[in-house]
C-alpha cells in the first residue's frame, strides 16, 4: 500500500479527515464525523493496524470517543468514554487529549476538569488515574481561558509528563502511579509569586524520542513585568526549565512542535497576548534550529497584512516524511500547509469550521 498522509481536523462542528499521497499535491476532505459537535482531541495511532481516535463533546448527550479502523472513512463510538465515579462530585466537561501508551491498546486521555484516564483495551473501557486525578492539588487548580484542561500527555520512558491549564507541569516517574509538580523555572504572570510550585498556565509541552529528557514548553507569557517566561526548555526530564524566548516577537502563544528528525528544531506561533492574534496582522511561524538559542520568522505564502487569525494549542502539527510539512489550523477555519519544514505556506482549505486541533500521520 502506498504511503498516505492522513490529517485529522477537530473543529467546532465535528471531525474532518483529509487524505493525500505522500507528494501532498492534493488533499481530499471527508466528514464531518460527529457532525455539529465540538472535537478538541484526536489521535492517529500507528501501532499495528492504524486507528484514528477522536473526542466528541455533545452538550446534550455527553462525551463520546470515536474510533476508525479504515483511516477515517467511517467512525464508530467506543463502548464507553471516560467519566468520573458517581461519588466524585465532578462532571466531565470535555476531552482535551488522547495519547498512545506503551502497549498496543494502551490509551491515555486528559479531560476537563483536569483529570487523567487510562484504557487498556483501545478505548472501550476507561479507569480514572487516581495519582493525578485525586492529587492533593487537584481541587485547587483553577480554569484558564479555555477551561481547566489536561491538554498534554507525554511518554518519556517510565516517566509521564502532564500539562494542565491552570495547574502547571506534573511528572510521574513510576509510570503513572504518582505525580508531583515539576515547575522549577516555569513562571506565572497572574499570581503574586512569580514562580509558584504549581498553578502555572502551561499551554503545551513537546518532546522528541531521540532526545530523552529534552522538552520544550509554551507557557502563558506576554507579561511586561515578567518577561521571558513564555517559551521554555528543559534538558533534565522536566525537573528544571529555562527561557528560550529571546528573539521572538512575543512569548505568548499556544502550540509548540518539534521537528520529527531533529530535536534541535522547534516551532512556535507567537501571538499578541491581549488579542490572541498574529502580531501586526501578519501571520508567521517561528523556527529555531538550535534548541531555542535563536529564531527565524517563516511567513512565505501567508498574507502580509490584515490577517488576525488565532492558532490554538493543538492546531499545529508536522508530518515525518523526509522533508516534513507543517499543518496549521486557525479559529477562522483555514488549514495551512508549510512545505520544506515551514519555508513556504499554502492554504489547503479556507472555509472550515473553527479548527481546534490538527493531527497528522503518514500511514
Image (cartoon, rainbow, N blue to C red):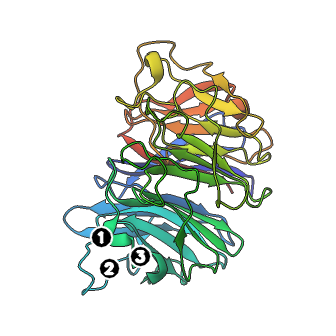
Mark earlier in primary sequence (1, 2): 2
Q: Is residue 339 above or below residue 120?
A: above
Q: Is residue 347 above or below residue 23?
A: above
Q: CA distance from mark 1 to mark 3?
A: 12 Å
Q: Residues within 10 Å of mark 2 (few under 14, many from 20)?
A: some
Circle nearer the viewer, 1 or 3: 3
Q: Which mark is residue 133?
A: 3
Q: Which residue is located at x 69 percent, y 62 percent?
A: 237
In the rendered image, the residue lying farthest to the front is 193
Element at badge 1? Answer: loop
Q: CA distance from mark 3 to mark 2?
A: 10 Å
Identify the residue under disc 1: 92
Q: Is residue 317 visible?
A: no
Q: Position of residue 321 (x, y in %)?
A: 76, 45
Q: Which residue is located at x 51 percent, y 28 percent?
A: 250
Q: Is residue 156 left or right of residue 95?
A: right
Identify the residue under disc 2: 84
Q: Is residue 293 visible?
A: yes
Circle nearer the viewer, 3 or 2: 3
For residue 139, what is the image quadrant? bottom left
Mark earlier in primary sequence (3, 2): 2
Q: Residues within 10 Å of mark 1 (few under 14, many from 20)?
A: some
Q: Is residue 152 above or below residue 28?
A: below
Callout 1–callout 2 Cβ contact below 8 Å: yes
Q: Which mark is residue 102?
A: none
Number of numbered markers: 3
Amino acid at each position: 500500500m502506498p504511503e498516505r498522509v492522513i490529517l485529522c481536523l477537530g473543529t467546532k462542528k465535528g471531525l474532518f479527515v483529509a487524505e493525500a499521497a505522500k507528494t501532498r499535491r492534493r488533499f481530499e476532505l471527508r466528514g464531518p464525523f460527529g457532525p455539529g459537535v465540538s472535537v478538541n482531541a484526536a489521535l492517529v495511532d500507528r501501532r499495528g493496524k492504524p486507528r484514528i481516535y477522536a473526542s466528541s463533546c455533545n452538550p446534550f448527550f455527553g462525551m463520546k470517543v470515536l474510533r476508525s479502523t479504515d483511516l477515517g472513512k467511517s467512525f464508530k463510538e467506543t463502548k464507553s468514554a471516560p467519566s468520573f465515579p458517581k461519588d466524585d462530585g465532578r462532571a466531565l466537561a470535555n476531552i482535551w487529549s488522547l495519547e498512545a501508551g506503551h502497549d498496543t491498546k494502551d490509551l491515555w486521555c486528559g479531560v476537563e476538569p483536569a483529570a487523567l484516564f487510562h484504557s487498556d483495551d483501545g478505548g472501550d473501557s476507561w479507569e480514572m488515574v487516581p495519582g493525578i486525578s485525586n492529587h492533593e492539588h487537584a481541587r485547587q487548580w483553577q480554569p484558564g481561558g479555555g477551561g481547566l484542561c489536561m491538554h498534554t500527555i507525554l511518554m518519556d520512558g517510565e516517566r509521564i509528563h502532564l500539562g494542565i491549564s491552570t495547574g502547571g507541569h506534573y511528572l510521574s516517574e513510576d509510570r503513572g502511579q504518582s505525580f508531583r509538580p515539576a515547575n522549577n523555572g516555569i513562571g506565572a504572570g497572574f499570581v503574586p509569586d512569580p514562580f509558584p510550585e504549581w498553578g502555572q498556565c502551561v499551554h503545551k509541552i513537546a518532546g522528541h524520542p531521540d532526545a530523552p529528557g529534552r522538552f520544550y514548553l509554551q507557557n502563558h507569557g506576554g507579561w511586561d513585568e515578567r518577561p521571558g517566561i513564555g517559551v521554555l526548555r528543559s534538558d533534565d526530564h522536566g525537573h528544571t526549565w529555562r527561557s528560550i524566548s529571546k528573539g521572538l516577537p512575543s512569548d505568548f502563544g499556544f502550540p509548540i512542535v518539534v521537528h520529527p528528525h531533529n530535536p534541535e528544531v522547534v516551532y512556535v506561533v507567537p501571538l499578541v497576548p491581549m488579542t490572541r492574534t498574529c502580531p501586526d496582522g501578519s501571520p508567521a511561524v517561528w523556527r529555531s534550529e538550535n534548541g531555542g538559542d535563536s529564531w527565524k520568522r517563516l511567513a512565505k505564502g501567508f498574507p502580509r497584512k490584515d490577517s488576525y487569525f488565532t492558532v490554538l494549542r493543538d492546531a499545529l502539527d508536522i508530518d515525518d516524511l523526509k522533508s516534513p510539512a507543517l499543518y496549521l489550523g486557525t479559529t477562522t477555519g483555514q488549514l495551512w500547509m508549510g512545505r520544506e519544514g515551514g519555508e513556504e505556506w499554502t492554504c489547503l482549505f479556507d472555509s472550515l469550521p473553527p479548527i481546534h486541533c490538527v493531527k497528522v500521520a503518514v500511514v
